């Protein structure tokens, strides 16, 4: 009986010597770069500690008022010069060259007259054309032999005209049949003979020379009497003939 009572006393003494459990406040990480947020965080930690540990007496700090930010005024928008007029530049309607041309016109107008900076269009890169050369076989052609013609001596004219039944035309290209200015008569106009001359203007107001040295610029009989120097006309064009 005595042993049982002794055990009970020893158990009560051991329970009395166990310390009461210590209540711990939760750990809170507060920012240190803002004094207002730091103060609010510490006060919030005190409230959390009071909720967890009812015997805890919280200590609240007076927090400063959050400073109001002063609005920064926007920079004034430069006004365009009302008297300034931009030169209109024509842009070819070919993409993307027209895109670059339009942006250049906007930028030039902004630099000249000011105002709001223009919004430029995003243009694709210009493609450099690549020249591709292809080699094709050169066709060989066989030329037919041409009939040889006997050249006349320099300083002479081929005869032309004549009667209508045996009229002779000029065979050379760009040659015409006119009256021979060194022979009397009316020439091809009345079924007479004439000479072949190159249908090339000489003399006149500009004073065109004859192509060959020794030729003479004479009146063109096809002009009629309106350009006949013998009738008082001047600055009329003529044709080149060889004197004979």
Image: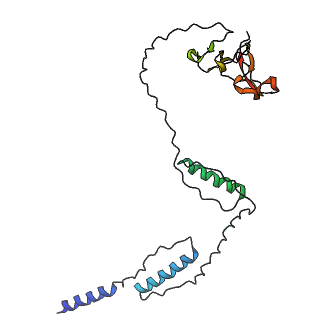
The answer to whether any part of residue 112 appears in the image is yes
**Residue furthest left in the image:** 1
Q: Residue at horizontal 46%, vertical 31%?
A: 132
Q: Quadrant of residue 4?
A: bottom left
The part of the image, by quadrant, that contains residue 206 is top right
Which residue is nearer to you in this view: 122 or 90? 90
Q: What percent of the width, then of the height, locates residue 143?
A: 45, 14
Q: Position of residue 116 (x, y in %)?
A: 66, 62
Work out whether residue 148 or residue 187 is closer to the camera in this orientation and state it: 187
Q: How many marks?
A: 0
Image quadrant holding the C terminus, namely top right
Q: Quadrant of the N terminus?
A: bottom left
Horizontal and vertical percent position of residue 158 = 63, 12
For this orientation, the residue located farthest to the right is: 232
Estimate the x, y position of residue 10 in percent, counting from the top left: 26, 87
Q: Is residue 178 above or below residue 2?
A: above
Q: Is residue 5 left or right of residue 125?
A: left
Q: Is residue 198 visible?
A: no
Q: How is the model colour-coded?
A: rainbow
Taking the image as shown, residue 221 lies to the left or right of residue 129, namely right
Q: Is residue 135 above or below residue 72?
A: above
Residue at x 47% of width, y 10% of height: 145
Residue at x 62%, y 15% (from the top left corner):
160
């Amino acid at each position: 009986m005595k042993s049982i009572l002794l055990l009970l006393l020893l158990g009560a003494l051991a329970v009395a010597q166990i310390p009461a459990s210590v209540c711990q406040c939760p750990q809170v990480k507060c920012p240190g770069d803002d004094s207002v947020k730091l103060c609010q965080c510490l006060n919030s930690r005190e409230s959390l500690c009071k909720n967890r540990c009812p015997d805890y007496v919280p200590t609240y700090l007076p927090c400063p008022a959050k400073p109001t930010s002063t609005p920064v005024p926007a920079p004034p928008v430069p006004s365009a010069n009302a008297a300034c007029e931009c030169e209109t530049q024509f842009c070819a309607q070919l993409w993307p060259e027209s895109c670059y041309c339009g942006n250049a016109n906007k930028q030039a107008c902004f630099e000249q007259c000011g105002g709001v900076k223009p919004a430029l269009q995003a243009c694709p890169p210009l493609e450099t054309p690549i020249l591709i050369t292809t080699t094709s076989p050169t066709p060989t052609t066989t030329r037919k032999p041409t009939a040889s013609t006997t050249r006349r001596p320099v300083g002479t004219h081929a005869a032309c005209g004549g009667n209508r039944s045996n009229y002779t035309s000029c065979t050379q290209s760009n040659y015409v049949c006119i009256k021979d200015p060194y022979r009397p008569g009316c020439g091809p106009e009345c079924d007479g003979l004439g000479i072949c001359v190159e249908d090339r203007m000489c003399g006149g107001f500009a004073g065109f020379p004859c192509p060959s040295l020794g030729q003479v610029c004479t009146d063109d009989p096809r002009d009629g009497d309106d350009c006949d120097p013998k009738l008082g006309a001047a600055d009329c064009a003529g044709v080149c003939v060889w004197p004979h």
